[in-house]
Amino acid sequence: MTNDGIWLNARIAPQGDPGNAIEHGAIAVRDGRIAWIGAESEMPAGFDGAIPRHDVGGRWITPGLVDCHTHLVYAGNRADEFAMRLAGASYEDIAQRGGGIVSTVRATRAADETALLQQSARRLEALLAEGVTAIEIKSGYGLDTATERKILRVARRLGERYPVTVYTTFLGAHAVPPEYKGRADDYIALVCGEMLPQLHGEGLIDAVDVFCENIGFTLAQSERVYEAAARLGLPVKMHAEQLSNLGGTRLAARYRALSTDHLEYLNEDDVVAMRQAGTVAVLLPAAFYFLREKQLPPIELLRRHGIPMAVATDSNPGTAPTTSLLLTLNMACTLFRLTVAEALAGVTTHAAHALGKSGEHGTLAPGRAGDFVVWDVDSLAELCYWSGMNRCGSVVKNGIRAK
């Protein structure tokens, strides 16, 4: 199957922004990468009839979507805990009773790699059907070396099996496992001294994350993880300011984190630190919705300081059991009041930036991956407007039609 081709008769939003579109546009792909993009009437000589041509009938094309924050690989589910929350229990209450992250850890430790792959593949397939061509997958449901390895191996295998680019993030510092209860510092020593160097040495880690929160890890413990990541030359990110403000964002900015994520309790000092560090804000409206939170992220503050805002599913079993980035777009607009242009940039340009991969994904430009989506819509606003309707017509991954 050739990964060369020309897509013609398109309305193209190279950065996902419908206000910056190419009418009657064309995209030429050679060897899986974009060779040229622009108005069809301006296509240079050299793209002759030997290259397969695809008339998209005036439909919209955007970059392939990027889901830059997921916990996609795990076993089981937490539907019973959802029922507990409906009866009045808080996220913290459930975690203190041995539920939450730790309950998924038990299920994930018990699953073999084949079962884990099968369960995770179903979730990935749902995202790919909506136009996702690049995704981040975190570990963090193992909390021991063997299971963290298993999760990261499954994430790598998903990238080999499916037409998607998978970036792996090590989140060993996600929760304190039961066997280390009351000994969080000892567990962080294991994360930094054994897990991180071993799994990095096996080529399983692209970035490092930490859950800095009252029910997670302290600033001092988070910094130990960052120091270990720095010794290995790995970029960092952080779950920060979701349930309270511990100053995690400012710590992350000192280490020039790719992103800080959640951010409901962010303040202006945090935002200034992000701007100076070039850190992206990753908004996770599905978790906000599912937990019925009331504290909104300070969107206007982020706008005022020019912080790029990415949007992601946070797909996970406890606080965001969603496999729809399109539904998440709707939530970003309805709950967080993002504009259509902001939301679409959040799952393309800014999402790629949050992964440190803005030179590869998120924008259609010569030299970048030939990853894009043809949409069955009259307006790109429909991608944010519809709730539960998938208008993805076809997906091209590395110049080859994947859907």
Image (cartoon, rainbow, N blue to C red):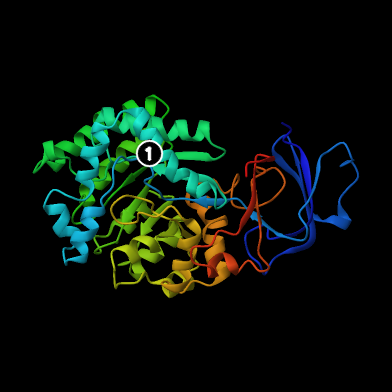
Quarter holding the C terminus? top right
Measuring from the top left, give residue 346's x and y in whole percent. 52, 60
Position of residue 336 in the picture relative to residue 146 (left or right):
right
Pick whichever, 385 or 239, lies toward us.
Answer: 385
Q: Count of labels shown?
A: 1
Position of residue 137 in the picture relative to residue 29 (left or right):
left
Q: Amino acid type of disc 1?
A: Gln
Measuring from the top left, give residue 42's x and y in whole percent. 87, 55
| Residue at 59% over, 47% down | 361
| Residue at 39% over, 65% down | 271
Quarter holding the N terminus? top right
Position of residue 235 in the picture relative to residue 19 (left or right):
left
Q: Residue furthest left?
A: 182
Measuring from the top left, give residue 188's x and y in whole percent. 20, 39
Q: Is residue 309 visible?
A: no
Position of residue 55 in the picture relative to residue 155 (left or right):
right
| Residue at 57% over, 49% down | 358
Pick whichever, 122 or 153, lies toward us.
Answer: 122
Q: Residues within 10 Å of mark 1 (few under 14, many from 20)?
A: some
List the residue tagged with mark 1.
119
| Residue at 56% over, 61% down | 345
Q: Secondary structure at mark 1?
A: helix
